[in-house]
Amino acid sequence: MASLEKDERSSAPVVSVTPIADANPFTEKPTVEDDAAPAAERGDASSPSKRTVFAVDRLPMTIWVVAVAGAAERFAYYSLSAPMQNYVQNQRSGFANPGALGLGQQTATNLTNVFMLLQFVAPLPWALLADMRLGRLRTLMISMCVYQAGTVVLLVTSLPFALERGAGLPGFLVALVLIAVGVAGLKATLPPFLVDQYTRTDSRSLKETDDEVVVSDRTLTIQFITNVFFWMTNIAALSSLASTWIEREVDFWASYLMASLCLLLTQILIFAGRNKFTTIQVQGNIVPLATKAMWCAVRNGWSLRKASPDYQRQHHGREVAWSDATLKDIRGALAVSRILVFSCPFYLGYLQVFHNMISQAGQMQLGGMSNDTMQVFNPVACIVLGPVIQRGLFPLLRRMGVPFGPIARIATACFIMGAAMAYAAVLQHLIYSAGPCYTHPLHCPAAVQASSGVAVGNDVSVWMQMPVWFILAVGEIFGFATISEIAYEMAPKSMKSLVQAVTQLTAGLAAVVGIALSPLTRDPTLVILYGVIGGLTAVAAVLFWVFFKDVDTTQNQEHSDGEDMLQPSSESER
């Protein structure tokens, strides 16, 4: 919740986050009736006797249902993805880490990158389907069915009898495609569908006391929704702890069974609430019209102004099918898409969570646990640090008058990701400097234990990797919620799913870069790999801020203008 307080040194208000004790998020009704509306709602909020407090609005139940459904899907996803590196990389026996297919680290990393790339590229056709024809709800339900089909294929082909008959790799490849395509549909539709459930665009009174008026604010509410959803998905990501324990103590198929059941819960929640959800009317042929308008702009010197109906009529004597509103939507979509595409280095650092960080843990002394269990500390760190940053750091910066808009937050996230990779490079150097296998961990005779015949990692404790997971978590907190926020708020109404797909294309671009760097994903060049990623990400953070800082400046100015409207005029003060 956000409050607007007067600074004693000036008349400018300072935004801070404070809770509203009686704000029940499960009701939509304001606490003040219309006939007893406070000064803020009657139009005289500028009364000097009361301060105006901006707060997060009450949320309808449908938001919480969609959020829980999304969290259940994330629970299923991490139950599938957490064991994936081990499933592909390691043999079924002979190593301290569990395995199934035994294809090695480089192949496992490449397949994981392909899996991520499909998830990030495939949202585009889903987004077009949602925005032009089916709507977000129906598209979401279809994509979940594709997702579930892939989960079932992976479950069946990971059973021991299927692996013994050689069905493991073909089944994994088929499941990889189906799951990635299904996940892509959810990525394109579920985040905007979640925010669609909050339909209020104007402010309303929430509470009035003798000295303050509490008024809802849409921007703060959207931030709250995206941040809470991010926090809930990180709680769901703790499924990686259960799935990695299950893969070690039972088998991979048991982890995949858990994933399938949790995904079924998501399907049940969405299907049961289908008649209660707010659905946005399909915008029809906006994308084909936008494509034609952009092609016209390209043919006229890359100028959208020259693609306008008036310009075409006056200079070429022809009528066009699109309107000035279509061109306005195109400008808005291009502006936000440019920001999203240049956040690619952030995703490059984040993607290391799913493969190379897991493999690095496997090269160290594990103390009896599975190497992919370490990744559970990433969502744990997000859960612990998220409220500290959202409810502590951000309000403190606002009270101090330090601007920290979305561009600054994304640039900071990129830099922090670079710092995490720099630490990983130093840690990899320590691994290579320790015995028994030095620059080729797990692959020397001295690594094999005589008692068990299992190869163990070099003499560096896996707990040395803990800071990487916490540093990555801080970067994710700054980055993910902010990217979701601007992708929804800055996108035109007719292209919200499409712009959401652009965020996934950006992550796909990062996966392509990761594939290009794959020759370095082997011993003894992993130090170079982490160093290159860390350097690229840190440099990109600076460039991102330099190119897009004006967006923050404009947003801060607009916010200041809005605050000025709340201040009493000089005449009323007299």
Image: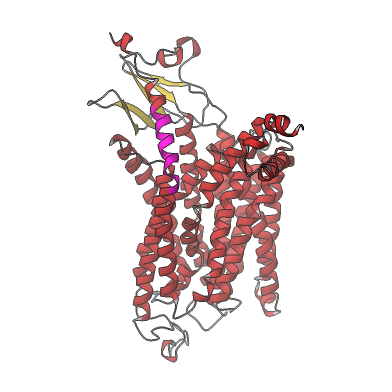
Q: Name the residue located 35 percent from the left edge and 85 percent from the top edge.
A: 435
> Where does residue 411 sit, x and y in percent of width and height?
41, 50
Q: Residue at x 44, y 51 (%)?
A: 544
In the picture, the quarter occupied by the N terminus is top left
Q: Which residues are magenta?
A: 547-560
Q: Residue furthest left?
A: 9
What secondary structure do most residues of the magenta stretch adopt? helix
The residue lying at 43 percent from left, 62 percent from top is 536
24 or 421, nearer to the observer: 421
Q: Residue furthest front?
A: 315
Question: Is 153 placed above or below 134 here?
Answer: below
Of residues 33 and 183, which is closer to you in this image? 183
The correct choice, above or below, for 344 with respect to 156 in the image is above
In the image, residue 54 lies in the stretch drawn in magenta = no
Residue 2 visible? The answer is yes
Kindly indicate the quadrant of the structure image that contains residue 9.
top left
Q: Quadrant of the C terminus?
A: top left
Q: Quadrant of residue 271?
A: top right
Say whether residue 551 is magenta: yes
Identify the colour scheme used.
secondary structure
Image check: 318 left or right of 492?
right
99 up-or-down from 548: above or below = below
Q: Position of residue 171 (x, y in %)?
A: 69, 70
Residue 510 lies, in percent from the top left, at 53, 60
Counting the numbered discs, the total is 0
Provide residue 276's location: percent of width, then percent of height: 65, 33
The one of 396 and 269 positioned closer to us in this rendering: 396
Up-down: is 30 above or below 2? above
- Residue 238 visible in the picture: no
